[in-house]
Image (cartoon, rainbow, N blue to C red):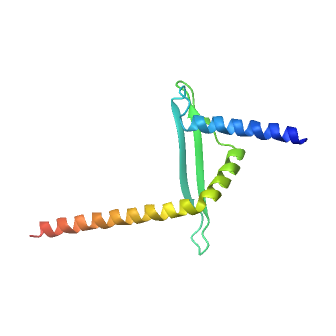
Amino acid sequence: MSKIEEYHAAKETADRLGSDVSKALGRDPDNNQHRVSVWFTKLADTVWSPMLIAVQAMHGYSGSGLISDTSEELGKHLATAITEQLPELLDRAVVLAKKAAEQARLDALEEATAVLEACR
């Protein structure tokens, strides 16, 4: 494949991914059904525990089914983007965990206060 053919193939992929992501995020005004979701699956309970983060992107139009917007190309580029942003994402995960811990502390305090009030 010549360099110009490689460029055309890469540009076609980039344009398709841009369109797919735009539709999945609901940026297409004709698209009234869209969803991007991410979930975690624990793979092992060992000292070295790999994680699986799954991403699903899809869109649809009224009266039709949902169409997947995920592809091998999007997966490869998304993995690269995540890797580039990983320090910030990991720091954000810690912040969210600390917020959850603080909320749990406040809930426990509220429960303890209610129990003490009920015992009076």
Picture quadrant of residue 56 = top right
Whether residue 52 is situated above or below residue 120 in the rendered picture:
above
Is residue 103 rendered to the left or right of residue 45?
Answer: left
Residue 73 pos. (x, y %) = 72, 45
- The part of the image, by quadrant, that contains residue 100 is bottom left
> Residue 18 versus residue 67: which sits nearer the camera?
18
Q: Residue at x 62, y 55 (%)?
A: 82
Asked if 100 appears above or below 76 in the picture, the reply is: below
In the image, taking residue 119 as reference, residue 5 lies left or right, namely right
Using the rendered view, name the quadrant where residue 67 is placed: top right
Q: Residue at x 59, y 52 (%)?
A: 54
Q: Position of residue 2 (x, y in %)?
A: 91, 41
The outermost residue toward the bottom is 47
Q: Is residue 58 above or below residue 44?
A: above
With 113 as the anchor, is 81 left or right in this view? right
Quadrant assignment for the C terminus? bottom left
> What residue occupies the far right of the structure in this picture?
2
Camera-side residue of 80 and 101: 80
The quadrant of the picture occupied by the N terminus is top right
- In this view, the residue in front, 110 or 12, is 12
Q: Residue at x 44, y 61 (%)?
A: 96
Q: Position of residue 22 (x, y in %)?
A: 59, 36
46 to the left or right of 13: left
**Number of numbered callouts drawn:** 0
